[in-house]
Image: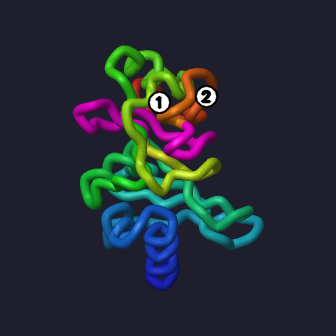
Amino acid sequence: MLGDLVRLRAVADYQFGRGAGDALFPSDATVEYSKNTGKPRHVEAGGALLASYRPNDGLFTLTIAGARRLLEGTGAPGYTVTILDDVVEAVEGGGNVFAKHVADAGEAIRPGDEVVVVNPGREVIAVGKALLTREEMLRFKTGAAVKVRRGRSRHR
């Protein structure tokens, strides 16, 4: 178990940057394993699901609780998308982020990356998958920029 937590922290460091593993997964985190394969599936702490481990690519999908821990512990500047205040309510309800509503985005973002959507005050609004690079998010005026998986109001 402890060996798996160390390995999962290393994956988080790779995916979100140095220090992300320690910020995301505290020492009291528990790992839930797949009954079929015996591989890690979910990581929880304090009664909250923090992240799910995807066996197909070996990376994580975040929950709102996990995104908050990541942001508090590291700031995760490379993987945040800041949206305009006008659309916060729609996005926290689970709506996708469109390029014209992106105020800023982390420089490391590539299509397919797991990202944290924040408001201008850096509060977590949603988590999802980037569909565009940072440059495209800021330049394009049409089209989806982030496919939202979980919005804050639906997963408190």
Question: Magenta residues?
Answer: 117-136
Q: Is residue 28 visible?
A: no
The answer to which image quadrant residue 74 occupies is bottom left
Q: Compared with residue 82, is residue 16 higher up or lower down, i.e. above or below?
A: below
Residue at 41 percent of width and 67 percent of height: 17
Q: Which mark is residue 151?
A: 1
Q: Compared with residue 12, is residue 79 higher up or lower down, i.e. above or below?
A: above
The answer to which image quadrant residue 78 occupies is bottom left
Q: Is residue 118 magenta?
A: yes
Q: Position of residue 84 (x, y in %)?
A: 36, 23
Q: Position of residue 121 (x, y in %)?
A: 23, 33
Please, which residue is most extreme toward the bottom here? 3
Q: Is residue 12 visible?
A: yes
Residue indicated by mark 2: 144
Question: Is 109 on the left or on the right of 48, as rendered?
Answer: right
Question: Is 141 on the left or on the right of 85, as rendered?
Answer: right
Q: Which mark is residue 136?
A: none
The earlier-in-sequence mark between 1 and 2 is: 2
Q: Is residue 36 magenta?
A: no
Residue 61 or 13: which is nearer the viewer? 13
Q: Are marks 1 and 2 in contact (CB under 8 Å)?
A: no
Residue 36 or 42: which is nearer the viewer? 42
Say what amino acid the circle numbered 2 marks.
Ala
* Kind of element beneath mark 1: strand
Residue 97 or 36: which is nearer the viewer? 97
Say what amino acid the circle numbered 1 marks.
Gly
Q: Compared with residue 72, is residue 7 higher up or lower down, i.e. above or below?
A: below
Crowd tier of the residue under label 1, counting other residues whose Cα lies within 10 Å: few below 14, some 14–19, many 20 or above: many
Distance from disc 1 to disc 2, alpha carbons, whole Å, reads: 16 Å
Crowd tier of the residue under label 2, counting other residues whose Cα lies within 10 Å: few below 14, some 14–19, many 20 or above: some
Q: Position of residue 143 (x, y in %)?
A: 63, 25
* Kind of element beneath mark 2: strand
